[in-house]
Amino acid sequence: MFALFYEPRHRVVLVRVSGVLSSEDIATHDRVLLPFLADKTDVRAIYDFSSVETLAIPASKIAQRGQRPAIVTGRRVVVSSDQGGAEFARIIADEQRAAGLAEPTIVPTLEEAYVLLGLRLDATFEPVDLS
């Protein structure tokens, strides 16, 4: 399941994926996030993959994705457990580093992501319409 939220005061998008992380989630991310960010500047992101149980994207496709610049140009923090989201985050970070691109920071908890981005735990993330 893919969900997108925005915290306007701190200009942070929160992408949350749970269950199976699939190619469809990546396509939804691009389809929704590109137009959403079109009129915004200095946006940062949290990718919460802590509830991803299974990765359903071939490693070669993830590697190709990691070789391209990120859609969010500000700091990106990935919250990842030891399950499927961790593999995705690691491959993306490795490929972006190898391509000379800014890689995301990977942390084990949402609280750590908030700290890195200077957010308080009571930050108000508003749902973004995915249609």
Image: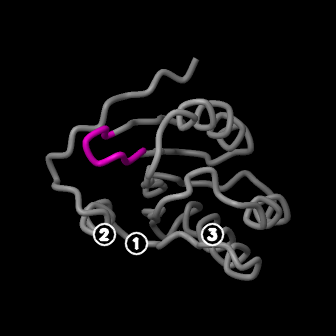
Judge whether residue 8 is colored magenta. Answer: yes
Name the residue type under label 2.
Leu
**Mark 3 residue element:** helix
Q: Earlier in the sequence, mark 1 or mark 2?
A: 1
Decide which of 108, 95 is in the foreground and name it.
95
Numbered badge on residue 116: 2
Judged by depth in the image, the label closer to the viewer, 1 or 2, is: 2
The label nearer to you, 1 versus 3, is 1
The answer to whether residue 19 is left or right of residue 65 is left
* Badge 1 element: strand
In front: 81, or 120?
Answer: 120
Inspect the magenta stretch and tell me whether residue 120 lies in it.
Answer: no
Q: Bounds of the magenta span?
A: 7-13
Helix, strand or loop under label 2: helix
Q: Tag on residue 67?
A: none
Provide residue 127's location: percent of width, then percent of height: 37, 28
Amino acid at pointer 3:
Glu
Q: Which residue is mark 3?
A: 87
Between the residue at mark 1 and the residue at mark 3, the CA separation in whole angstroms equals 13 Å
**Quarter of the figure with the N terminus:** top right
Judged by depth in the image, the label closer to the viewer, 2 or 3, is 2
Residue 123: give x, y in percent of width and height.
Answer: 20, 45
Mark 2 and mark 3 lie on one chain; the one further toward the N terminus is 3
Is the residue under label 2 in contact with that under label 1 (CB below 8 Å)?
yes
Decide which of tag 1 and tag 3 comes sooner along the chain.
3
Residue at figure coordinates x 59%, y 67% from the top left = 89
Looking at the picture, does residue 109 appear above or below residue 2? below
Tags 2 and 3 touching, CB below 8 Å: no
Residue 53 quadrant: bottom right
Mark seen at residue 107: 1
Q: Which quarter of the figure is the C terminus placed in?
A: top right
